[in-house]
Image (cartoon, grey):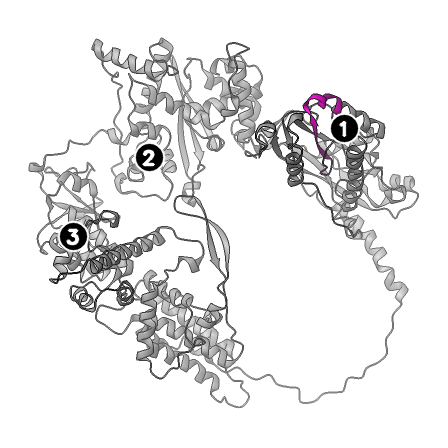
Amino acid sequence: MERLLMKKIDNVQVCVLGQLLWCFHAASRWSDSLRIQSLKLEKAEGASLVTGEALGSKTSVTKEAQTRLLPYAAIGTGVSGEPWAEKSINSRAEELGREPDPFLPAFSCKTGRWSTTPMSSSEATGYLQDFINECLPLPDLKIDLNKIGTHSLKTGLLTMAARSTSIKFSMSERRTLGHHIKPSDRSVLTYSREAFTSLYAKVLACFQQIQAGSFRPDSTALERIMDAATEMVSGLPAHPEVPQPPCEVPEEADPWEISSESSEEDQALVGVLSNQEEVQGRKPFPSEQEVDCIGIVHRKSGIVHALQPLGDYTLCGRPVTRNYVELQKADTEDMECCILCGRQLGVEKLESLAECISRVIRHLGLSNLTEHLGDLWVNTRRALCFRALRELDHCILQIELEEAYETVQELLKQLGIEDALKGELQDRGFETFGSLAFAVSTTPQQITDAVLEAWLLKVTTRDLSPYQVSCVRRLVVESHALALNDLQRKVDQPSDPQLAARKLPVAERQSRQTEQEQRLQGLIFSPEIIPSHALVDTCVNMVEQGVLSWIKPEDCTSRAQEIQSLKRDPKVSLDAAGNLKISSKTMHSTCTISSELDLRNAFQRRSLAMDQAKLCSFTEIERWVQHLFLSHERAQPSGFASVTLQQIIECDKQMFIRASNALIGSLQAEPGVAVTPLDKELAALRTSPELMPYLMPMPMKSLPKAGVQHSNGSWSFDTAAEAAYPERSSETRQYHLEMRKPQTDSPGFAEHLESTAQEEVDLAFLEGPFHSAEEVTNLLGHSKWRIMRRFVIEQGAKLRPIDDGLEAQLNSAYTSTIRLDLQDADYVVAMALKLGKHKELNWVGKTLDLSKAYKQLPIRPDHRDLAVVFFRDSRGKPRYYVPNALMFGSTAAVYAFNRVSRSIWFLVNVVLKVPSAVYFDDYPMFSPEGSSQDTDALVSDFLDLLGWRHDRTGPKGKPFSPSFDVLSMTLDLSNLESTGHLTLKNKEGRVER
């Protein structure tokens, strides 16, 4: 392909072929290559290098990633040694300019011009397959081009690197070459300027070996193994030493702690193909005996590292910059330990890390964390090994899973566990699902009798029956499943807020409800008063998220209302892995708040829900609600109205806004403290001056002191004059239509309208052109004619003129009393299966298409003045055309044409006895293979007799075949005779579009 580019003289083909070669040598997607902003060519004796910058990539998600310039590189002399890049860049500059936008637009072979839209991957695939055909050494050599697409170019260089045996590419280098890296390694690439030199030196060396004949990337796997074995036996080096310049890292920034929100592919693009595992400048790791565990903390990230003995580098190889401080002087609370330093230490202890972990514990409020660490916990002033650090993360996750003191009493009762064993479990601290989930140190699938019995010996001294042992096993497995389910919920965050909120387990929900009913003896708990499960889950989610939100009164539904609206609609969503999944979307129900009692009940249900979620106490939130309604019921001075319900709702919302702002991240009460932070905030806001204006009484509306009685009189109007208004309105409407801008306006649209209109004039479909309204008036004999504007729409690379019958109000004047019954794909498939029962005939099919179907039917002569075609030419001058045929854009034309097309279908089936269907102007037909040519000629002659033009050759005039295109699909009848089955698939090129 490189040599083919050097032979090409057509700049269009050179531009397209150069873009395809760029995708190969830069290992780039086709869509990413169209984002290139500029290219730079560097030349030397025997080689050249092309570098470019692209704005974002296909996988850029965040706003920052979508606006970042991502660099690319490619060898400009390629595999053949020919300067393909130089010729491609020069041709691009002549054809498209230095900085075209888009970088490679689509090319219209019909107009011979570049369009304004980027070239699609399907169009580029067509070019690629044509170029490969030209490159084939023998004309009769056939390959399956359908398996070759633009994405094959991205994999080409990576496959070559993987097959190279003398010059070896590590897995990290091949990943970086394809613009994929791990998130933990992205920082080296971000700050290594021109770090691609060492990697592309290997690529250039591979190309030179291909030119010399010592490396054949197309050889078989066995041949490559034999070549590598020969090199080993002969004593030659496994791969030549390729010099790798050191990567320079700025002193002002620490590249190891920079984070990003982009995907892995975006991070690789930033780094410009650097090998992060071979960065020069690092010192070798010391042995365990030489390790002196002195801790330092990064100021921004809070990551704790261990220093090497000399103090210039950490154990993980990071240079020590001024962004690091000693662990004892760190002022941050959120700290994490470097896993790479821990791997170098093994299980050796890291000095002062216990103090760091203690800060994390105090920050999270996990005073009882040491109980979960068990033997791994070391005294406060002693060191903490990295195994304990990993266990710490595990324990923090465990406490967050189900550690809202969910009782397991209901589950124990259902499982049939004895009361004595229940008490022993509680005495040992196993009161929650979270504690039971990790009680046995193995997965549920690997729990053996020995492991379970060893744990039970620590819990109880009694001999348990086999039945009780099985109950305990089930208890541990179900607790573990609940923990994993909660973790999965946190990973897969649904877009629906109701599905994102954690749902309480049934046992925990029932326990909270029972405890609340026993504590609040004065309330009557009926289904109309008990809050809905969704309302309670919303409040629980606030506590877990640490963010208080205002719940609208109409969303405070009851349990009775929730039971009556449990209908769920299917919903398609994406999971964390990007796979489609079908879930159920709960209907959002609301309650009425039209009266004082309805609103009071809604507020009471919200208070009960907040109390169950431990968000605040029922007493404090009810005091606030009582304060609102006392303001509503209080008698106001003369001339002032009472506080309205809308004022109460607005005041309640403002209170939640201020409370949420003051309590971000601190909604949970301290351990052992009954008063929550929201309780204190409610007591303070109840008398806050900021909320008083919302409960101020408003002045009553006053009446005038005096007035007069309105006297009704008779009235009349000139109905004839009123009826004349629409006529005058239509005159001004036509003037405004002519002055409007075109619906679609792009370069080349006006010229396309002129050329297509002239074609219709040559075929007598239109009469014109007329350059003034007076000419049209003289032709029609009156001035009460109406225009219909014509505009252009783009259907892929095809431009189609459309007449706007809706804007001209022509469609509004038509009403259909029938419904079109179209013979769609189901009809065609059913007919084919019916014909397939006659297996001895070996059926084939084709789709016959009428040429310019609508235009072959004339328009009624006295209706020509209702649809005068109008548009402005390339010079902005008006053009008028009087129609002689049906207009494409008129609703009436659709029904009129279908009447005729259905009649033709009837004649083909009844008179010619050819089984066929009809869909607008397409006629799928079937015939036995032996008489297919005669059937094709018979139908064509019949249509000629009727005077209907149709396609005989070309893409829409193909002969009968076992596989043919019908209604944007491909219908394959090759297996119909043998198996009675047929195959339906997308039409070629349909998936790309």
Instruction: Provide the residue span drawn in magenta.
Output: 918-935
Q: Nearer the viewer, mark 1 or mark 3?
A: 1
Q: Nearer the viewer, mark 2 or mark 3?
A: 2
Relative to 95, is 666 on the left or the right? left
Where is residue 750? Give x, y as percent. 71, 34
The residue tagged 3 is: 329
Mark 2 or 1, nearer chain start = 2
Q: Is residue 107 above or below residue 518?
A: above
Instruction: From the viewer's side, name the closer residue of 849 and 365.
Output: 849
State how far apart marks 1 and 3 are (Cα). Answer: 86 Å
State how far apart marks 2 and 1 are (Cα). Answer: 56 Å
Relative to 479, is 82 on the left or the right? right
Report the residue at 26% width, 54% height from top. Answer: 477
Label 1 sits on what residue type? Answer: His
Mark 2 or 3, nearer chain start = 2
Q: Is residue 144 magenta?
A: no
Label 2 sits on what residue type? Answer: Ile
Q: Nearer the viewer, mark 2 or mark 1?
A: 1
State how far apart marks 2 and 3 are (Cα). Answer: 34 Å
User: What secondary structure is found at the residue carrying circle 3?
Assistant: helix
Where is residue 778? Give x, y as percent. 91, 40
Q: Is residue 617 visible?
A: no
Tell whether label 3 touches label 2 (CB within 8 Å): no
Where is residue 869? Give x, y as percent. 80, 40
Relative to 753, is 347 on the left or the right? left
Mark 1 or 3, nearer chain start = 3
The residue tagged 1 is: 950
Bin the neighbour count of mark 3 within 10 Å (Cα to Cα): few under 14, some 14-19, many 20 and up: few
Tell whether label 1 touches label 2 (CB within 8 Å): no
Q: Which mark is residue 181?
A: 2
